[in-house]
Amino acid sequence: MNYDQLMFNINAYKENNQILDLAKFLVYEFELDHPNLEGFGFRDELEKNSILLTANGDIGERQMVLIPRNLFDFEFNLVINMIAHEMLHVRQKSPEMMLEDKNEREWQAYYEMLFHTNFPNVPDVSDYHKKFFAEKALEYYRRMGEGSELQAKYADQKLKVLSLIDNIQHNQA
C-alpha cells in the first residue's frame, strides 16, 4: 500500500473514531502481529505532547497493548515505531521467549526503533527521535550492570548505537 492510500485509511479510521481498529490495522499492515497479542485497549493520556503505550500482561501470558486515545494525533513515523516497540514486548513476553529481564527487553525494543531488525517495514523516525531513542537504549544498557553478561551480549549493538549518535551529532554540526 502506498503512503497516500495508507494516510487515507488512517484518516478514515480516525474520522470514525475507530482508534483501536486503526491500531490493529497498522499491526497487520506493517507485519508486526504476533499470536501473543491479546488486543488493544485504551489507557489514560498523560498530556497533549507525550505518548505512552504499554504491553500489559505477565510474562508467558498474552499481552494487551494499551494506547492513548490521541495516539494518532502524533507524527505517523513516530507512532508506528511506538507500536512496533510494544509489539516487540508482546513477542518478548510470549511463552516461546519469556524474556525476564526488563532492561534487556527495553534495550531490544529501543534498538529495534533505531535499526528495524525484526520489523523491516517500519519507517525511520527523525534524527531528533533517533537520538532520544538511542539515549534511552543506552540508559537501559547501563542498568544491565557494569561488566555484566547482558552488557557483553549487547556490546556490538551498543557500538552501533554510539556510532548512530555520533553520526547524528556530526550531521547537525
Image: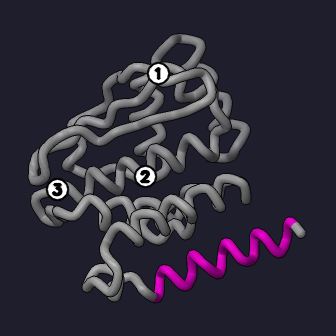
Q: Which mark is residue 115?
A: none
Can residue 9 be seen here? The reply is no
Q: Nearer the viewer, residue 168 or 115?
A: 168
139 shown above or below 10: below
Question: Is residue 96 shown left or right of residue 121?
Answer: left
Mark toward the start of the polypeptide (3 vs 2): 2
Mark toward the start of the polypeptide (1 vs 2): 1
Question: Is residue 74 shown left or right of residue 42?
Answer: right
Return the residue found at the far right.
173
Q: Which residue is mark 3?
A: 94
Q: Main secondary structure of the magenta part?
A: helix
Locate the C terminus and report the quarter of the image it occupies: bottom right
Q: Which mark is residue 85?
A: 2
Q: Nearer the viewer, residue 104 or 59?
A: 104
Residue under the image location 25 percent in, 85 percent down: 149
Q: CA distance from mark 3 to mark 1?
A: 27 Å
Amino acid type at mark 2: His
Q: Is residue 98 magenta?
A: no
Mark toward the start of the polypeptide (3 vs 1): 1
Can residue 61 be seen here? The reply is yes
Tell me the magenta residue range.
156-172
34 shown above or below 19: below
Residue 64 coordinates in the image, percent (x, y): 24, 35
| Helix, strand or loop at mark 3 | loop
